[in-house]
Each structure stands twice: as C-alpha cells, then as structure tokens.
Image: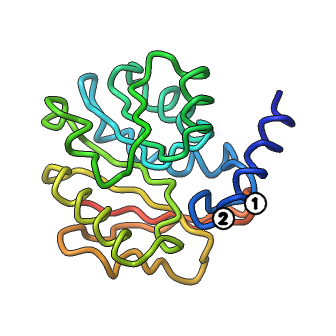
Amino acid sequence: MKVLESLAFFARYVRNPSSVGAICPSSRFLARKMVAPLKHIVEEDSVVVELGSGTGAVTKYILSDLGITPDKLFCIEFDKTSVDVLSEKFPQVNIANDSAENMINILGGELKNLKCVVSCLPILSLPEDCGARIIECVEKALPEGGMFVQFTYNLANSSVGKFMKELKHVKTSYTMLNIPPARIDFYVK
C-alpha cells in the first residue's frame, strides 16, 4: 500500500507541483521533529490544526506523539484526492477540503481551544498574496503563547518570516532524513 500511495502522491505532484510542493510524502523523521516541541503546550482539551495535510504523513505523528484525541485535530487540505485518503485513514479526525485561509471559520467554536498550527503547505511556492493571507489567518487564530510550525526545503532561509507581524521565530531544526532534506521553523505568538 505504501508504494501505491507514494506513486499516487507523485502523480499529484506532477499534475500540480506548486500546490503539492513535494515529490513524496514527508518522512517520519521530519514529522516527529515538527511535533516534538509542541508537547509542552498541548493539553488534553487542546485543538491542533494541520494545514496541507496531504495523505497524513504528519497527521499520524500529531495524533500519536501529542496524545490528542482525533476530534481535537483539524486537517485542512485543498486537494480532494488527498482528502479522500485522509478520510479513509483517519475517519474520526476533522478533515476539511478547503483553503487554509478559511481556518477560523472551519474551527468555529473550537477556535478558543487552539494551541498550535502545524503547516505542511508549500507557502513559498504559493502566490505571495496567498501565502501572506494564510500567515495572517494563523496569526489571528493563535492565542498568546500559541505555536506555529512550518517546514521548507530551502535549508538556508525560511522566507515565510517576511509575512509575519505577530509571530516570533524561536527555533530552527533540520532533518536530512527526508526527500528532500528539510528545515523546520518554530514561531510563537
């Protein structure tokens, strides 16, 4: 199944590289590095949002490593085929086939419990105004002390910071055990 899933992922990348952003799903090493620093802020009733969930490579570790119940995870994915895969793998997770710009409306009453946003979106590959709107939405949604995690394949610099007005960069991590290697940036409000 993993080989077929990887081939399907690659086919989606070929059809729309700027939207998919990668040739294969994120590795477990990348996923775990993205999630590990969130353990100290996530509590039992905390809500976590994953933007650009793809086929669930990071979703799996948000659930297992943070210990939240599936109903407290909101996955927002634009690609309908990926949403179908996510829905099959994680039937109890809140999955929205929508744009990340609509995160606040998607969360509804759960917005008050939001603690962190994990982004697997290719923000730097999106049109600049779209990337800016997504970051603005994240900044509006997160409470004081809330955390935003973003990865990029640009190891030298994460230009995502240029969109930020309220989030402060607190940490950078790297993993070479991913195709391609990735940089992970952590921000706090």
Residue 107 position, x and y percent, is 23, 35
- The amino acid sitting under disc 1 is Val
Which quadrant of the rendered structure holds the C terminus?
Answer: bottom left
Q: Residue at x 52, y 43 (%)?
A: 53
Q: Is residue 165 above or below residue 178?
A: below
Q: CA distance from mark 2 to mark 1?
A: 6 Å
Is there CB contact under 8 Å for labels 2 and 1?
Answer: yes
Dot label at residue 17: 2
Residue 153 position, x and y percent, is 62, 70
State the SS at label 1: helix
Furthest residue toward top: 92
**10 Å crowding of disc 1: few (<14), some (14-19), many (20+):** some
Closer-to-camera residue (172/2): 2
The quadrant holding residue 60 is top right
Q: Residue at x 19, y 50 (%)?
A: 141
As drawn, is 103 to the left or to the right of 124? left
Which residue in the protein does label 1 denote?
A: 14
As drawn, is 136 to the left or to the right of 33? left
As drawn, is 113 to the left or to the right of 38? left
- The amino acid sitting under disc 2 is Pro
The quadrant holding residue 133 is bottom left
